Image: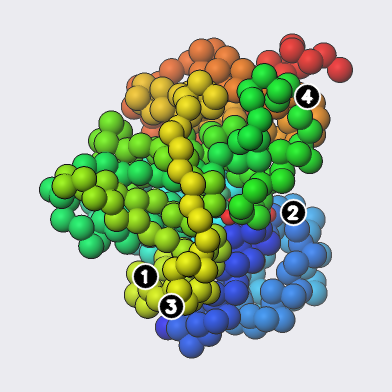
């Protein structure tokens, strides 16, 4: 029996994780969860999982109200609460389904405490990959990815000798504007950007998919997870999101991981600690999966990928700057304060304007995040005075 703490239970990955915990009810006990601002989801999660003893919510006043309704449960709130619940909940597995920088400290804390970390929050690795890699190399905790491309690569690497591999191919759908020219994007609305062609996901990652910052993040994520040279990792455009990633072998053949686009599959792989039966569950013959289309990645069409990889190559706190500026810009776009193409502009100015730190500690990364948020907000006001 694994005792599980689920961070981000009210989100897209979080709610699908609850489905997997229910499906394997004998193997898992949900002991705690967090829901951010969406406190209205607490009663239904508690009804489905009466084993819960620890809960974290966004606002302190909500934690106080809930404590009156559920006196036997320990409540926490805010960013500090997320860190405290990881420290206090009696669990052996932490599923991090938070979005954004908020996921970094809980990830680091879970590994420091020797937990199994099932990680959807890719921003943890983008910003703090070096710290996380150090912890894993020291044997402190273990990490299993949830991101579908990384689960695909994890599976493929486990079956392929390393010296046979020439390249890792990370597939990308191209997001909601893949059939439009870059020039036509200056006036697109958040509603249009949120209509992803193949996946139903939270708002932030859906916008990151439209800019393809998400794919830049995923190349960085793969680098920290699998320690492959950046030059040997390529982005492959693939419209249907059926091929979750592939390897090109030295002999010119390809091996690929193929299944319908459903995040339950990679979530189950991570939670079951890779011990799942990989039969295609939703289709029985390959032709049911339909036709696939592939294309070359165009770096000029999607400059966000270049910004991400440039920041990664620069090292230090550059990816923390990249991530924080991107978060501020994405939410400003969603709130219609800036245009879609401004997102990359804001990120680019932050990478130039926020001071560089060579070997950042966790505290340096937290400070960089704060400084960059301030910088990006000022930049938004300067460009778009209200
Ligand atoms: P979401 O927006 O649907 O859910 C995010 C969760 O985090 C919610 O529970 C929310 O309450 C909580 N949260 C957000 N900000 C918070 C804060 N500051 N403090 C505390 N809690 C906070 O997001 P999602 O789509 O489920 O994505 C979660 C993570 O998984 C992201 O890092 C994303 O990139 C990654 N991911 C998502 C998918 C997908 O299909 N949705 C696929 C691959 C990877
Ligand atoms: Mg992905």
Which circle's residue, 2 or 3, is located before the other in the chain?
3
> Do residues under tags 2 and 1 come within 8 Å of each other at their CB atoms?
no
Q: Name the residue under label 3.
A: 2
Ligand 1 within 8 Å, label 2 CB: yes
Q: Residues under labels 4 and 2: Cα distance?
A: 30 Å
Q: Residues under labels 4 and 3: Cα distance?
A: 49 Å
The N terminus lies in quadrant: bottom left
Q: Name the residue under label 4.
A: 187
- 251 or 132: which is nearer to us? 251
Q: Mark 2 points at which residue?
A: 37
Which circle's residue, 2 or 1, is located before the other in the chain?
2
Q: Mark 1 points at which residue?
A: 273
Residue 177 sits in quarter: top right
Which residue is at a point 16% across and 55% down the rendered structure image? 161
| Number of the front mark, 4 or 2 | 4
Q: Residues under labels 1 and 3: Cα distance?
A: 11 Å
Which residue is at a point 36% across and 21% down the rendered structure image? 314
Kindly tell me whether residue 377 is visible in this rendering.
no
Q: Can you tell which mark lies on residue 85? A: none
Determine whether, in the image, residue 154 is placed left or right of residue 346: left
Which residue is at a point 74% across and 11% down the rendered structure image? 382
């Amino acid at each position: 029996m694994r005792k599980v703490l689920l961070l981000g239970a009210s989100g897209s990955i979080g709610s699908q994780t609850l489905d997997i915990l229910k499906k394997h009810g004998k193997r898992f006990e949900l002991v705690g969860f967090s829901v951010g601002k969406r406190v209205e989801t607490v009663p239904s999660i508690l009804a489905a999982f009466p084993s819960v003893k620890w809960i974290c919510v966004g606002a302190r006043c909500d934690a106080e109200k809930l404590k009156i309704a559920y006196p036997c449960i320990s409540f926490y709130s805010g960013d500090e609460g997320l860190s405290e619940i990881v420290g206090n909940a009696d669990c052996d597995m932490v599923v991090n389904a938070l979005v954004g920088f908020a996921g970094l400290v809980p990830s680091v804390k879970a590994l420091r405490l020797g937990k199994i970390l099932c990680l959807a929050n890719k921003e943890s690795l983008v910003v703090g990959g070096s710290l996380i890699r150090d912890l894993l190399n020291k044997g402190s905790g273990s990490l299993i990815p949830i991101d579908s491309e990384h689960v695909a690569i994890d599976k493929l690497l486990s079956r392929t000798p390393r010296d046979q591999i020439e390249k890792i191919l990370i597939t990308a759908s191209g997001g909601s504007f893949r059939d439009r020219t870059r020039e036509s994007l200056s006036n697109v609305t958040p509603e249009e950007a949120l209509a992803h062609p193949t996946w139903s996901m939270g708002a932030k990652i859906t916008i990151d998919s439209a800019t393809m910052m998400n794919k830049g993040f995923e190349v960085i994520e793969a680098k920290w997870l699998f320690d492959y040279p950046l030059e040997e990792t390529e982005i492959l455009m693939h419209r249907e999101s059926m091929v979750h990633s592939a390897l090109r072998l030295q002999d010119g053949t390809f091996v690929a991981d193929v299944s319908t686009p459903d995040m339950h599959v990679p979530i189950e792989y991570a939670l079951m600690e890779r011990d799942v039966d990989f039969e295609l569950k939703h289709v029985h013959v390959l032709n049911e999966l339909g036709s696939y289309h592939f294309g070359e990645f165009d770096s000029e069409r999607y400059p966000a990928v270049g910004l991400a990889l440039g920041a990664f190559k620069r090292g230090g706190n550059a990816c923390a700057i990249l991530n924080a500026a991107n978060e501020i810009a994405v939410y400003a776009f969603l709130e219609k304060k800036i245009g879609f193409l401004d997102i990359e502009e804001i990120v680019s100015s932050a990478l130039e304007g926020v001071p560089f730190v060579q070997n950042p500690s966790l505290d340096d990364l937290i400070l960089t995040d704060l400084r960059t948020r301030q910088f990006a907000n000022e930049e938004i006001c300067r460009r778009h005075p209200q």
